[in-house]
Amino acid sequence: MISRRDVVTAGVLGTLVSTGTAERAEAQPAPTNPGEFILRDGFNKLDTSVDEFKAAVDQGLRGNSMSFGNVGQVKAVIQKYIKTSGKFPEYCDIGLDVFFDVYDWHVRHQQQIQITRMADQRMAIQFMFTQLVLRSENDDRYVGTPFDR
């Protein structure tokens, strides 16, 4: 139990710092003091918020690049196809989020956007040498297996 004197003299943050290992911290009993429980809960929420902030800044600075995000997933699938067949695929099915990310990638890198409507009334966007076919009935982040006719 933490005495009032320890809290006042060491400061609020000093009382929460553990001198032991992580296993020792997990083995500690649940806090009985409501103030300690509120502080631990607050610090856990703060840690989660910092992680979310780092992810948002990372996404904002990197955006959709060839090695990050949904465009990176499409690139990886196309690379695997090229390694096995020796050529670019004609088609690859994608979800709605991937479609918009590929569109944003074209805008960000000032590339020509070629969107067409196929014979089966599906939308397709040209990405490198492959037509990415929008499959809105699938998951938004869906990236299918590339194929030829």
Image (cartoon, helix red, strand yellow):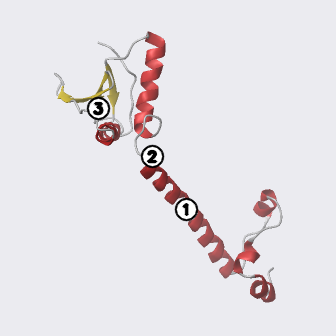
CA separation in Å, label 2 and label 3: 26 Å
Residue at the image point whose x is 77% and y is 68% from the top: 29
Residue 86, compared with residue 103, is above or below; it is above
- Dot 2 crowding, Cα within 10 Å, few <14, some 14–19, many 20+: few
- Dot 1 crowding, Cα within 10 Å, few <14, some 14–19, many 20+: few
Q: Position of residue 22 (x, y in %)?
A: 77, 58
Identified by mark 2, the residue type is: Arg
CA separation in Å, label 2 and label 1: 18 Å
**First-in-chain label (2 vs 3):** 2
**First-in-chain label (2 vs 1):** 1
Q: Which residue is mark 1?
A: 50
In the image, is 100 to the left or to the right of 3?
A: left
Helix, strand or loop under label 3: loop
Quadrant position of residue 25: bottom right
Identified by mark 1, the residue type is: Val
Q: Position of residue 103 (x, y in %)?
A: 29, 38
Helix, strand or loop under label 2: helix
Q: Nearer the viewer, residue 117 or 36?
A: 117
Q: Which residue is mark 2?
A: 62
Identified by mark 3, the residue type is: Arg
Residue at the image point whose x is 64% and y is 75% from the top: 39
Quadrant position of residue 99: top left
Helix, strand or loop under label 1: helix
Residue 144, compared with residue 136, is above or below; it is above
Residue at the image point whose x is 72% and y is 77% from the top: 32
Answer yes or no: do the residues labelled 1 and 3 have beta carbons within 8 Å?
no
